[in-house]
Image (spheres, rainbow, N blue to C red):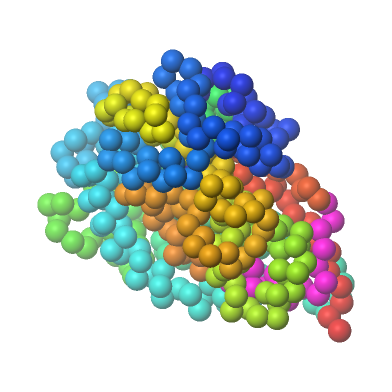
Amino acid sequence: MTTARTYPAATAYREILDQANRHDPYPYFAELGTVPIQRLDADNWLVSSHEAISRLLRDPRMSTEDPRIDTADVPLGSDGKPVTGPFLFRDPPHHDTLRRQTMYRFAPRVMAMRPHIETLVTELLDKRLGDAPGRLDVVAELAYPLPIRVICELLGVPPADEPVFHSFATRLTKALDPEEALTRQEIAELTVTRREWRAYLMPMIAQRTERPGPDLISALLTEGDPRTRMTQVELGITLGLLLIAGHETTVNLVANGTLALLRNPEVLTGLRADPESVPAVVEEVLRYDPPVQMTSRQATADITVDGHTIRAGEHVTLLLAAGNRDPRRFADPHAFRPGRPANAHLAFGGGVHYCFGAALARMEAHAALTAVATRLTNPRLLDDPPPYRPNTTLRGPAELLVAYDAVT
Ligand code: HEM
């Protein structure tokens, strides 16, 4: 995911940011992919090959920190240094400490949720489906509510607050887009939203500190060595990260997956006949139409890639979605073919920032796509291509209307 910063006005960026290309950026990515790495301007590079992206994601000389942040009034974190951002935008070693503390308490709670996630999917569809024919917006009625409900339950947020969380998730996600893709008004709205998010969280944090429950927020506040435990400011920022990194990404995975299934009826039929094949289907959706299209890094030392030297201080955009269609890595890359051998896609990134929520995202997508394949009779798209949300970094349909027949 990209930090909000200004990108160069090079043609390649204009094409990537252009909403007109949002429904199908892949022909353009394929063109870019013929050049594994290219300089865009004085201090920006674009990387499109699977090999170079994988290498740079794992290179400790590539940073996610923004060195321009003014730390004058920034509170200090558990490492005694200013809290400049969530752990996605921190480098080791503090990144590792914050990630480890969070993961230690997040992973067991996620593992315990699997059966519950399947129940949530069943409940969402039961609300909508009967025996009669009908139509469903897969985004609004399945893909969107599922991850919000899951994250609220993990954090111990009461169901009555789900609409508030939902609204924060949508508004904060804009922060992941390149600044160039945002209007001045959107940037101003983001500042207000961040302030509202802090105001919303603070009473909840105070209440959990006093009366901890079994939820993740309470665990992060009260467990572990108090000398190294994350501060309340770090906790608030970490919760914001889980929300923006974990919500619309999962929405897009379920929506992109449904779209791929309905455009490839033989795969849909195969999944209906053998629901246990869902992991291979989900991995192929992640490769073929990744919810996170790109991310960025800044070099902290000179690094040579494919004969080009990225100088210290220069910015690099890693086009994950282009790397996933790299013909040097994947045979017939534009075909949607679940079960392809060694599907080492880049959808969850790589290296120290490898997606923190990958196991949860997979669980939610397995449950949702199995339900789409097994519970809808003769499903078909009513609008193809569907309308897309304007977001660039996290790309996915704004709605996905599907018609289905009566249960026979
Ligand atoms: C990091 C993708 C779901 C939390 C990342 C990165 C990618 C990614 C590409 C790496 C960004 C970079 O290196 O710059 C996805 C996709 C998802 C998904 C495609 C769903 C399909 C989730 C969920 C959560 C989550 C459900 C949590 C609830 C995070 C966090 C990071 C991250 C906290 C930062 C990790 C770090 O810096 O160590 N994700 N994500 N993600 N993701 Fe996910």
Residue 217 on the magenta segment: no
On screen, 26 above or below 333?
above
Q: Quadrant of residue 128?
A: bottom right
Residue 356, given in percent of the width and then of the height, sits at 39, 56
Residue 372 on the magenta segment: yes
| Residue drawn at the location 39% of the way across and 29% of the way down | 307
Q: Is residue 117 left or right of residue 140?
A: left
Q: Nearer the viewer, residue 10 or 187?
A: 10
Q: Is residue 60 left or right of residue 23?
A: left
| Residue drawn at the location 62% of the way across and 24% of the way down | 14
Residue 405, given in percent of the width and then of the height, sits at 86, 73
In this view, the residue farthest toward the top is 42
Residue 136, given in percent of the width and then of the height, sits at 78, 62
| Residue drawn at the location 36% of the way across and 25% of the way down | 309
Q: Quadrant of the C terminus?
A: bottom right
| Residue drawn at the location 27% of the way across and 40% of the way down | 60
Q: Nearer the viewer, residue 191 or 303?
A: 303
Q: Quadrant of residue 260?
A: bottom right
The answer to whether any part of residue 144 appears in the image is no
Q: Is residue 180 left or right of residue 210?
A: right
Residue 114, given in percent of the width and then of the height, sits at 48, 75
Provide the residue span drawn in magenta.
Answer: 366-383
Q: Nearer the viewer, residue 129 or 403?
A: 403
The answer to whether any part of residue 99 appears in the image is yes
